[in-house]
C-alpha cells in the first residue's frame, strides 16, 4: 500500500515513516509537515492511506480528514495522536484505526493489518463499513468496534457503555448522540438510559414496574414515553419479516 504520513513534529514524522517503511505491506511512504503540504502532495500522488496527526497548526487532522472524505476516491484514514479525546470524532469520520503515541511497532503492525483487510474490500463497501465502527479502549489500546457487534447501549452521564456479546466498552459519546446517529440502523430508544438493537429483542412484556424488553438473558426497562413507538416498530418489523 502507498501511504502519506502527516505530522507537524519532525521527529514524530520521521519515526512513523521509518516504522511504516519497515513493514513489507507498505510499498511507498510519503510525508508532509502539515495539512497544506499534505493537500499539495495529494494533488500529484495516488495514495491508499493517510496517517494523520490530530493537533497541528492551521488545518488540524480532523479538519483535513473531513476534506479527504469529500475526495472522489477518498483514502483510508488512520489517526495517530497522543490524545484520546478525539475518538468520537474519529468514529464520525470512519477512520480505520486510531493509534496512540508513542507508537508501538506491534500496534502499528495491527493497524496495517486492518488496513490491508479494509483495502481488499471494494471502496464503496469499505467506506460503508468504516462508517459503522466506533473507537473503543481495550487493554489500553484504541480499537474500532463494528456497530453490528453492539447489542444495547447504556447511558452513563456524558458517556455511553456499549454492550456486546463478549463484554462492554465505555465511549465518550452521549447516548442521545448515538440514538440520532444509529436510528437508521435498527437501534431504538426505549428509555432515557437505554438504546437497543431492535432485531435482537426477543420479547416485550409487562413487569411489576411497567414494560421490559428481553435480549437473551438481559432485561431492560421501557419508559412510558417510548412504549408506543417501540410497539409500533416491533409490529412493523414483524410484518416485514412475514412479507419476505
Image: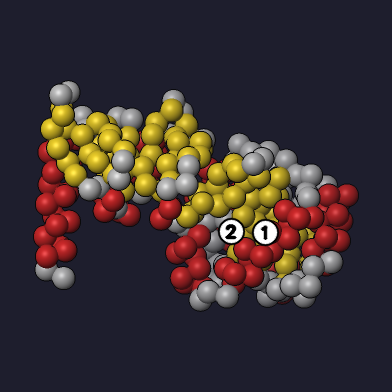
Side of 179 relative to 204 (left or right): right
Q: Of helix, strand and loop, which one carries label 2?
A: loop
**Residue receiving disc 2:** 96
Residue 110 drawn at (x, y percent): 68, 59
Can you say which quadrant of the picture contains the C terminus? bottom left
Side of 3 relative to 194 (left or right): right
Distance Cα–Cα, label 1 vs label 2: 8 Å
Query: Which circle, 1 or 2, is nearer the viewer?
Result: 1
Residue 65 drawn at (x, y percent): 60, 55
Viewer-side residue, 203 vs 136: 203
Can you say which quadrant of the picture contains the N terminus? bottom right
Look at 83% across and 67% down and name the residue there: 21
Q: Is residue 174 visible?
A: yes
Q: Is residue 160 above or below residue 237?
A: above
Circle 2 packing at 10 Å, graded few (<14), some (14-19), many (20+), is: many
Q: Of helix, strand and loop, which one carries label 1?
A: helix
Residue 187 drawn at (x, y percent): 31, 48
In the displayed orientation, state which residue is furthest to the front: 217
Look at 44% across and 41% down and name the residue there: 162
Mark sitting on residue 13: none
Q: Earlier in the sequence, mark 1 or mark 2?
A: 2
Image quarter for residue 17? bottom right
**Colouring used for the render:** secondary structure
**Residue receiving disc 1:** 111
Look at 87% across and 56% down and name the residue there: 14
Circle 1 packing at 10 Å, graded few (<14), some (14-19), many (20+), is: some
Q: Is residue 35 visible?
A: no
Residue 4 drawn at (x, y percent): 73, 64
Q: Is residue 131 above or below residue 75?
A: above
Look at 20% across and 29% down and name the residue there: 223
Side of 143 relative to 110 (left or right): left
Q: Are marks 1 and 2 in contact (CB under 8 Å)?
A: yes
Amino acid at each position: 500500500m502507498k501511504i502519506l504520513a502527516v505530522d507537524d513534529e519532525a521527529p514524530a514524522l520521521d519515526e512513523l515513516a521509518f516504522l511504516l517503511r519497515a513493514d513489507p505491506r507498505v510499498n511507498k511512504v510519503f510525508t508532509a509537515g502539515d495539512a497544506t503540504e499534505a493537500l499539495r502532495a495529494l494533488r500529484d500522488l495516488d495514495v491508499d492511506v493517510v496517517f494523520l496527526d490530530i493537533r497541528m497548526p492551521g488545518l488540524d487532522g480532523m479538519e483535513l480528514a473531513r476534506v479527504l472524505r469529500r475526495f472522489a476516491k477518498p483514502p483510508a484514514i488512520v489517526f495517530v495522536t497522543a490524545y484520546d479525546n478525539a475518538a468520537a470524532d474519529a468514529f464520525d469520520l470512519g477512520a480505520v484505526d486510531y493509534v496512540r503515541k508513542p507508537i508501538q511497532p506491534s500496534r502499528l503492525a495491527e493497524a496495517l493489518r486492518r488496513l490491508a483487510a479494509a483495502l481488499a474490500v471494494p471502496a464503496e463497501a469499505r467506506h460503508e463499513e468504516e462508517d459503522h465502527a466506533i473507537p473503543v479502549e481495550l487493554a489500553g489500546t484504541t480499537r474500532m468496534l463494528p456497530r453490528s457487534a453492539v447489542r444495547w447501549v447504556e447511558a452513563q452521564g456524558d458517556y455511553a457503555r456499549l454492550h456486546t456479546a463478549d463484554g462492554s466498552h465505555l465511549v465518550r459519546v452521549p447516548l442521545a448522540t448515538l440514538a440520532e446517529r444509529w436510528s437508521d440502523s435498527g437501534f431504538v430508544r426505549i428509555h432515557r438510559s437505554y438504546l437497543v438493537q431492535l432485531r435482537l429483542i426477543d420479547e416485550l412484556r409487562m413487569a411489576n414496574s411497567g414494560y421490559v424488553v428481553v435480549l437473551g438473558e438481559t432485561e431492560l426497562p421501557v419508559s412510558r414515553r417510548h412504549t408506543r413507538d417501540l410497539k409500533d416498530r416491533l409490529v412493523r418489523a414483524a410484518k416485514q419479516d412475514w412479507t419476505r
